[in-house]
Image (cartoon, rainbow, N blue to C red):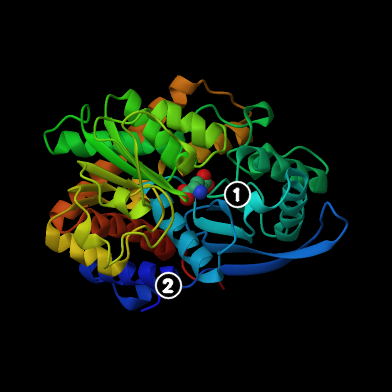
Amino acid sequence: MSYNPYENMLNVLEKAAGMLGLEKSDYEELKYPERELKVSIPVRMDDGSIRVFEGYRVQHSSSRGPCKGGIRFHSQVDIDEVKALAAWMSLKCAIANIPYGGAKGAVKVDPRSVSHAELERITRRYTAAIFPLIGPERDIPAPDAGSTSEMMGWIMDTYSMMKGYSVPGAVTGKPIGIGGSLGRSEATGRGILFTARELFHRLGRELQGACIAIQGMGNVGGTTARLMFREGCKVVALADISGGVINYEGLDAEALYQHCYINRNFLESYNAPGVIHCTSEDVLCADADLLIPAAMENQLTAEIAPNVKAPLIVEAANGPTTVEGDEIFAKMGKYIVPDILANAGGVVVSYFEWVQNTQSLMWDEEQVNGMLEKTMRRAFAEVLNKAKEYNTTLRLGANMVALERLVTAKRIRGIFP
Ligand code: GLU
């Protein structure tokens, strides 16, 4: 069966709606994105030739506030993926209880396959193409897989030039020098740490000393590995697109972060005493207390799930577990903190950034991290309570919390005209 992330999203949403006893008419609208824009992005390449790239921006819901979500730069991206990612943003913002709806954008390109100057031209032209849809009160982009803070700076500048004045609140995840928030670049990883800590506490355990396996060495995976390492966890297995490394005595996550994220190398060229090279699948199936998929969708499938040893899973990626994989995990008795709760730290600090931008405030990092921790802990408690009330999984609990808030907003607003 071919994997469709949008079907995956709808499947879980339907189940949650059923458990809540919602009428079809209460949530029918949420099955469809409000707007889908497809754009072509002509760019002059360094050799003088013209290439036309494909881009998207999907706005899933604006019931609870402006649409919000990142922009993915990836060679394989398609509209169903962007639609699913946009819907997950609506659910995520509702769970974190921040006043946003959900959106997502994408450009079909491997950012490593073009030069830095070409990447800047692609990003700026894409911004111009989606300009009619975005803005601080309308839809606010941010980084996602394959996009960086520097690229958010180009988006901010392009948007501002087209408006004729500086609009820092048009995009989040910007460099600090133009209105980015302290703590934003590490926010998703830090949110994962808070979530994992909360999970362990609820189970009567300490996170310190726990063995962790992480798939993904981008901003989210790399930061999570480093923060967990600093917390006193034993990071035993890590993977990126080149493969994985395992050391059950513990890997040096600081050195690996430097090697992969800062110096832009792959894990396959990392060597240190005791380090064994393996596949990404070996990392997902490593002997660990906690598995953190922090790469892409569709990783924990029906084929892989039976071999996953970690009893606890915290989803840092969006949609890493398929519906079939999830069913197998449920039978195995695994405890899973779903993506729309666990990885909300990024968009929560994006919200703090936008609040600072739109009100000309400047907060210190301690304040930002403190508010992030409070928000994550509250969201975790609300989801856990809902799951307990309905005697179900955290995934369905999270979807139920989100659905209730989205449906309430829709009900209050009604249908125009
Ligand atoms: N791309 C991130 C996510 O999937 C962050 C989105 C944002 O900050 O708007 O949650």
Q: Quadrant of residue 252?
A: top left
How far is disc 1 from disc 2 in space, using C-alphas? 26 Å
Front-lying residue, 5 or 33: 5
Q: Label 2 CB, ligand 1: below 8 Å?
A: no
Residue shown at the point (34%, 45%) measured from the top left: 342
Q: Are marks 1 and 2 in contact (CB under 8 Å)?
A: no
The x and y percentages for residue 212 are 27, 38
Q: Say whether disc 1 or disc 2 marks the residue closer to the N-terminus.
A: 2
Where does the N terminus fall, quadrant-wise?
Answer: bottom left
- Tell which of 177 and 257 is nearer to you: 257
Q: Label 1, on which residue? A: 140
The answer to which of 110 and 321 lies nearer the viewer is: 110
Task: Please indicate, yes or no, whether residue 185 appears anywhere in the rendered image.
Answer: no
Left or right relative to 44: residue 283: left
Q: Please, what is the three-letter code of the amino acid marked with disc 1?
A: Ile
Identify residue for label 2. Answer: 4
Q: Quadrant of residue 38?
A: bottom right
Disc 2 secondary structure class: loop
For label 1, the SS is: strand
Reply above or below: 85 against 263. Answer: below
164 or 145: which is nearer to us? 145
Residue found at the very far right of the displayed protein: 48
Residue 201 on image: x %, y %: 17, 33
Identify the amino acid type marked 2: Asn
Q: Which residue is rendered at x = 55% and y = 58% of the image?
A: 104
Q: In front of the other: label 1 or label 2? A: 2
Q: Is the residue at mark 1 in contact range of ligand 1, meaning its CB lies under 8 Å from it?
A: yes
Q: Is residue 315 left or right of residue 145?
A: left
Left or right, residue 403 beside residue 152: left
Up-down relation of residue 397 to residue 247 (above or below): below
Q: Is residue 302 visible?
A: yes
Measured as percent of width and height from the top left, residue 412 is found at 42, 61
